[in-house]
Image (cartoon, helix red, strand yellow):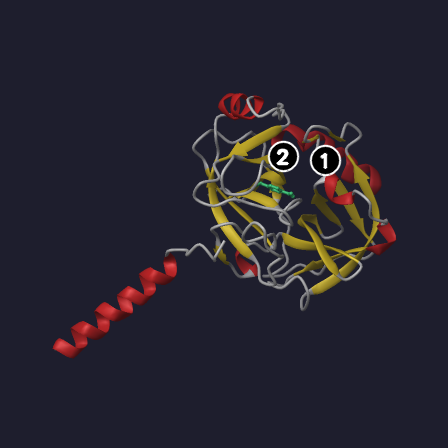
């Protein structure tokens, strides 16, 4: 009886300890998630190295951030889908065409930071590889969303070999705008912000998904932030870009 109690207490202790992320376990301060939880996630590879995240919109189209295409040649790009590792497993397809939003600029921070990738051959969809639909509406402040990727888990740090996820809360845009104005960055109406204190995206997560898991809609694409885990994370507002994304896919497929 006593042994049983000690055993169950120590098991409970182990479980709860593993659920509290230590400072070394960070997307920043996130947790490992298997690809089946976020089957819309891909790694965008430049030659053989992870460069950015991406999102499966259809078997032949991937959404990512426009800044991920900076200084890369389309012929060197591919995506890996269906694996929790950016470096192995799943399916790899080459990118045929990459289309940045025509209003994309990068000063003082990225604006209109979205792009569409057309794949050479379609992905085979299944439990680890699946498309996600675009949100119709900008998420309300307070909505809890899931971000994922292979980005830095601490600053300074390196790209993690295994996929991480983190739940983040959407912030009021005006507050985020005022916050960043004070440190000379510009949050505009093509962006949404999420609180960074409970966990955040970081370098290498860019282009990846921010998802409202309650209704399984893509609400954001990882874009930028001042540092990781301290100031709000900034995402392209998918509802804002919905028409452009749909039109661009239709015109190029
Ligand atoms: C980056 O450099 C980056 N904390 C992406 C996301 C965030 C910061 C930086 C958000 O790609």
Crowding around mark 2 (Cα neighbors within 10 Å: few <14, some 14 to 19, many 20+) is many
Residue projecting furthest to the left:
1
Residue sitting at x 69%, y 28%: 108
Residue sitting at x 54%, y 32%: 193
Q: Residue 245, labelled with which disc?
A: 1
Residue projecting furthest to the front:
156
> What's the CA distance linking mark 1 and mark 2?
9 Å
* Helix, strand or loop at mark 1: helix
**Residue 102 image point, x, y percent:** 80, 30
Q: Quadrant of ligand 1?
A: top right
Residue 241, quarter of the rendered image: top right
Mark with earlier residue (1, 2): 2
Residue under label 2: 238
Say above or below: 186 vs 219. above
Residue sitting at x 87%, y 53%: 75
Crowding around mark 1 (Cα neighbors within 10 Å: few <14, some 14 to 19, many 20+) is many
Say above or below: 27 vs 87. above
**Residue 2 image point, x, y percent:** 12, 76
Residue sitting at x 53%, y 21%: 178
**Residue 131 image point, x, y percent:** 64, 50
* Helix, strand or loop at mark 2: helix
Residue 19, quarter of the rendered image: bottom left
Q: Are marks 1 and 2 in contact (CB under 8 Å)?
A: yes
């Amino acid at each position: 009886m006593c042994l049983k109690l000690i055993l169950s207490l120590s098991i409970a202790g182990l479980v709860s300890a593993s659920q509290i992320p230590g400072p070394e376990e960070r997307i920043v301060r996130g947790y490992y998630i298997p690809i089946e939880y976020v089957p819309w996630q891909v790694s965008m590879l430049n030659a053989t190295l992870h460069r950015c995240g991406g999102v499966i919109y259809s078997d032949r189209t991937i959404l990512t951030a426009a800044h991920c295409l900076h200084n890369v040649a389309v012929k060197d790009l591919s995506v890996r889908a269906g694996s929790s590792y950016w470096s192995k497993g799943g399916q790899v397809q080459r990118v045929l065409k990459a289309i940045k939003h025509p209003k994309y600029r990068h000063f003082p921070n990225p604006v209109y930071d979205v792009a569409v990738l057309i794949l050479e051959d379609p992905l085979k969809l299944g439990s680890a590889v699946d498309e996600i639909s675009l949100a119709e509406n900008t998420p309300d402040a307070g909505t809890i969303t899931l971000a994922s990727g292979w980005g830095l888990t601490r600053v300074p740090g390196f790209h993690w070999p295994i996929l991480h996820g983190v739940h983040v809360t959407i912030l009021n845009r005006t507050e985020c705008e005022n916050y960043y104005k004070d440190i000379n960055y510009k949050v505009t109406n093509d962006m949404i912000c999420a609180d960074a204190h409970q966990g955040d995206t970081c370098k290498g997560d860019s282009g990846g998904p921010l998802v409202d898991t309650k209704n399984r809609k893509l609400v954001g694409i990882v874009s930028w932030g001042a540092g990781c885990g301290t100031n709000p994370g900034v995402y392209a507002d998918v509802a804002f870009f919905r028409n452009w994304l749909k039109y661009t896919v239709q015109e190029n497929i």
